[in-house]
Image (cartoon, rainbow, N blue to C red):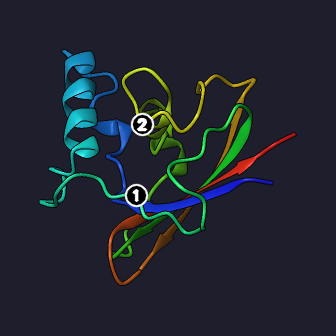
Amino acid sequence: MKEFLFECAPWPSQNLWVNKRYGDKIYRREKKKWRHGRRNGGAEMEIHIQHADQGKPRFEKCHIGIQLFFTDRRHRDEDNYNPKLLGDTLKTGGGLGIIKDDSNDLVSYTLNITEGADQDMAVVRIQEVE
C-alpha cells in the first residue's frame, strides 16, 4: 500500500469567506496565499517525503488523514476546516498532481484538531485505498 506523509501550514478557516460578500474572491485569494506559503510568512509550501520512493506518488483512490495543530487553546470547530483547499492543491490540473481528483467517490477525509501544540501546522497522510 502506497503512503505519502507531509507537513504544511494549516489552511484558513472557511469562516473567512463563507456567507460574505465577494466570498469567492476571498476564497481564491486565501487559497493562493496558503498554497504559496505567504499566510504564515514562510516560503513555498514544502512537502517532506517521508519514504524512499523517488518523486511524488500518484493516487487514484485514497484516504487523506489530516491532523491540525494550533499553539493556542482556543476551541475550533472541525467543520470550519473543510479540506477543499487541500484537495484542490493536491489534485492534477493546476495542483501538485498527487491525487487524480478530489471527488467524494475517489477521496475520503478524516480531520482532527489539537490545541496547545508547539507550533501551528498540519500533518497530512495520504494512503492508497483498494
Quarter-of-image position of residue 50 = bottom right
Image-based side of 103 in relation to 121, left or right: right
Q: How many marks?
A: 2
* Residue 115 vertical position relative to residue 44 in the rendered view, above or below: below
Q: Is residue 119 left or right of residue 42?
A: right
Q: Secondary structure at mark 1?
A: loop
Q: Is residue 105 visible?
A: yes
Q: Which mark is residue 47?
A: 1
97 lies above or below 124: above
Q: Is residue 40 above or below residue 94?
A: below
**Residue 123 visible in the picture:** no
- Looking at the figure, which quarter contains the N terminus? bottom right
Look at label 1 and name its amino acid: Ile
Residue 120 x, y percent position in the rendering = 33, 69
Give, as a three-letter code, the residue at label 2: Leu
Q: State left or right for residue 115 relative to residue 104.
A: left
Q: Residues within 10 Å of mark 2 (few under 14, many from 20)?
A: some
Residue at 41% across / 80% down in the picture?
117
Q: Which residue is at the far bottom?
A: 118
Q: Secondary structure at mark 2?
A: loop
Q: CA distance from mark 2 to mark 1?
A: 10 Å
Tell whether label 1 touches label 2 (CB within 8 Å): yes
